[in-house]
């Protein structure tokens, strides 16, 4: 199949017609941005701001926790939550742990969830608090072994005066049940797993990563609503 080139006739002469993909991983690109712009804002969640420094630290912590649970290279990890800081952190953390992200539509329920678990063999799921009730029953009679429960209110400013959706305003889940762990407890455990979190440090060993230009224009801020 030949590439469509009709638009070349009106394409700006100063712009390239092709894109060269970086030879670094998605996680490494985050790592480089955090090294170069640690205090720049990476995520705006309502009126709360998260810097690249904090984002990278929390990604590393969650990746360490996942590896401690036995997640290894090529494993599939379910990501079942709404747009939130935890979604972004989870996505990068799964990649950092050398695993594969399986994003699940928050509208999916038991039948679809059971299919995803059977199809991917996922043993771990990171789920939003408001969705946990739909996937928790599948800890029985499926390959699923653990669910990390994320409460979106964890990343909201305590003194916010914004009118928040119920899912965001709900107090953080802090219960205890077999196979369930809160986001906060998982993060705390991950922070102590420095020896486990050695999956890849490409930027330290690869000259490609070190010389790959990261222009300020490429450092984007994610606004989550």
Image (cartoon, rainbow, N blue to C red):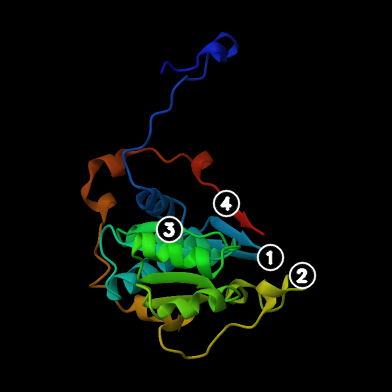
Q: Do the residues labelled 1 and 4 touch (CB within 8 Å)?
A: no
> Which numbered marker is on residue 47?
1
Estimate the spatial distance between the alpha carbons at disc 3 and disc 2, rounded to whole Å: 32 Å
Q: Which of marks 3 and 4 is nearer the N terminus?
A: 3
> Which numbered marker is on residue 80?
none
Q: Position of residue 19 (x, y in %)?
A: 43, 27
Estimate the spatial distance between the alpha carbons at disc 3 and disc 1, rounded to whole Å: 29 Å
Residue under the point 27% across and 72% down: 70
Q: Where is residue 224 in the image (x, y as percent from the top left)?
A: 63, 58
Q: Is mark 3 on a helix, strand or loop?
A: strand
Q: Mark 4 points at which residue?
A: 221
Residue under the point 57% across and 63% down: 108
Estimate the spatial distance between the alpha carbons at disc 1 and disc 4, rounded to whole Å: 13 Å
Q: Which of marks 3 and 2 is nearer the N terminus?
A: 3
For residue 14, say whether it is visible: yes
| 137 on left or right of 158 | left
Q: Name the residue under label 3.
A: 102
Identify which residue, 79 or 64, lies in the foreground. Answer: 79
Q: Earlier in the sequence, mark 1 or mark 4?
A: 1
Q: Which of marks 4 and 2 is nearer the N terminus?
A: 2
Q: Residues within 10 Å of mark 2 (few under 14, many from 20)?
A: few
Q: Mark 2 points at which residue?
A: 162
Q: Earlier in the sequence, mark 3 or mark 1?
A: 1
Q: Are marks 1 and 2 in contact (CB under 8 Å)?
A: yes
């Amino acid at each position: 199949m030949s590439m469509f080139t009709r638009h070349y006739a009106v394409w700006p002469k100063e712009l390239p017609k092709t894109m060269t993909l970086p030879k670094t991983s998605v996680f490494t690109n985050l790592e480089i941005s955090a090294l170069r712009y640690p205090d720049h804002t990476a995520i705006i969640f309502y009126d709360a701001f998260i810097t690249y420094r904090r984002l990278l630290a929390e990604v590393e912590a969650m990746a360490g926790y996942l590896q401690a649970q036995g997640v290894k290279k090529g494993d599939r990890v379910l990501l079942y939550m709404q747009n939130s800081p935890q979604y972004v952190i989870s996505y990068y953390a799964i990649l950092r742990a050398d695993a594969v992200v399986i994003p699940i539509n928050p509208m999916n329920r038991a039948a679809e969830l059971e299919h995803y678990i059977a199809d991917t063999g996922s043993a771990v799921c990171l789920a939003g608090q408001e969705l946990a009730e739909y996937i928790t029953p599948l800890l029985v009679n499926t390959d699923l072994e653990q669910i990390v429960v994320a409460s979106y209110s964890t990343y909201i400013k305590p003194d916010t005066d914004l009118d928040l959706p119920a899912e965001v305003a709900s107090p953080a889940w802090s219960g205890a049940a077999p196979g369930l762990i809160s986001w906060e407890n998982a993060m705390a455990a991950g922070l102590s797993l420095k020896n486990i979190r050695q999956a890849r440090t490409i930027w330290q060993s690869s000259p490609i990563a070190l010389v790959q230009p990261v222009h300020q224009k490429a450092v984007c801020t994610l606004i989550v609503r």
